[in-house]
Amino acid sequence: MTSTSELTFVLGRFVVHGARTKAEDWDAERYSTNAAFVPELGKNLLDLLAPRVGERILDVGCGDGVLTAEIKARGCRVVGIDFAPDMVDAAARKDIEAYVMDASAINAPFLLAKLSAHDHNDNCSSPPSPPSQTTATEGDPAAPLPPPHREGNRAERGEAPVAFDAVFTNAALHWVRAPQTVIEGAKRVLRPGGRFVGEFGGHGNMAAVRVAMHAALWRRGVDPLAVDPWYFPTPREYRQLLEAAGFIVDDVWLVPRPTVLPAGTGMRGWLSTFTKAFLNAIPEEASSNRGTTNENGLTQTKATVVDEALAALQPALRDKDGFWTADYVRLRFRAHLPHDSASGTGVERTY
């Protein structure tokens, strides 16, 4: 699917130097068990998006479609994309139009052609039934299609090109080690004046976990910097990237959000779900149990690393009642494209 020799972000996930989070690592049922709080905490992000009835919205890194369905319920024509087929299937089961696609190479012609195909529907609250999963076997998102804005009928009627009114993303872009690729992709699918709104891990996010995983890899002779998948920028850094791409930044800021993890799975479930890049980089130790996995899908070697991380994290992140708190820091942003060639300035919060 992807090269093992290059650092390649894939929607909400990644591949890096042979040690990778693979599409099959993302199990929708396990994600729902260990991380249902992610879309739940992202619901108030919809107020920042402010979707309006009739708008066309692209959800980048839609995952299992929980927030995507919330947007659709507000009367919008929403399309989701995600790297993991199992997550796309889960979104489709919620009646979401979703496609397997790489966020670092958003296929604007394909997505805009899909919009154009349904452009006769004036009421976007009733979109066509989505496929269970669209891949190369049905409307290949990787295959270039003629841009819909070149269709003669719209131009002849003097209508604006078909494009998305907004691009939305939650809890995905911190997996993008080349963030400008996603920003440029968002720009290509948006209409003039279109919005780019989202939230992802910001500077300082999961700092204790990051240190613990780095230490575990160093002890095993693996360079964690070569496999660390995360990108947690400052507001100033991300503002500069948005502005360099031609966006007008309305606001960008950090939100400290200590998050109590589910009682049943706690930090073990979190690490098993979100640190596969580190775990996949660790050579398997020879043992009679090498091919077996635990309830979180981890081999004995990987489970041992998780145990080490838990021991290191317990003093800081586990309370006396046994509850784990994740040291989340989120970066939120809202930007838009100019309606014409004019430029503008937004508000920046540096805290």
Image: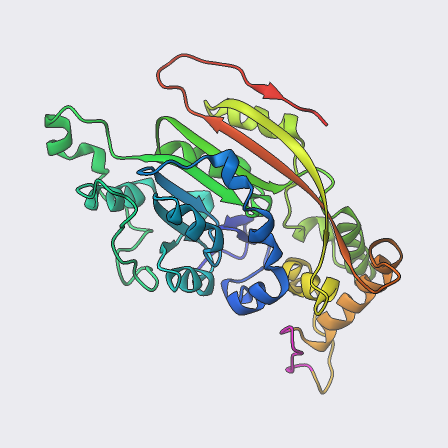
229 or 38, which lies in front? 38
131 or 124, which lies in front? 124
Q: Is residue 295 magenta?
A: yes
327 or 4, which lies in front? 327
- Which quarter of the picture shows residue 31? bottom right
Residue 11: horizontal and vertical position, in percent? 48, 50
Residue furthest top as drawn: 342
Residue at point 37%, 14% (across, down): 341
Residue 19: horizontal and vertical position, in percent? 61, 60
- Which quarter of the picture shows residue 113? top left
Residue 209: horizontal and vertical position, in percent? 76, 53
Q: Going by the image, does 146 lie left or right of 16?
A: left
Residues drawn in magenta = 290-297
Q: Going by the image, does 141 lie left or right of 250?
A: left
Residue at point 49%, 27% (across, down): 335
Q: Quadrant of the N terminus?
A: bottom left
Residue 137 shows in the view? yes
Residue at point 26%, 60% (across, down): 138
Residue at point 42%, 59% (across, down): 91
Predominant secondary structure, magenta span: loop
Q: Is residue 332 magenta?
A: no
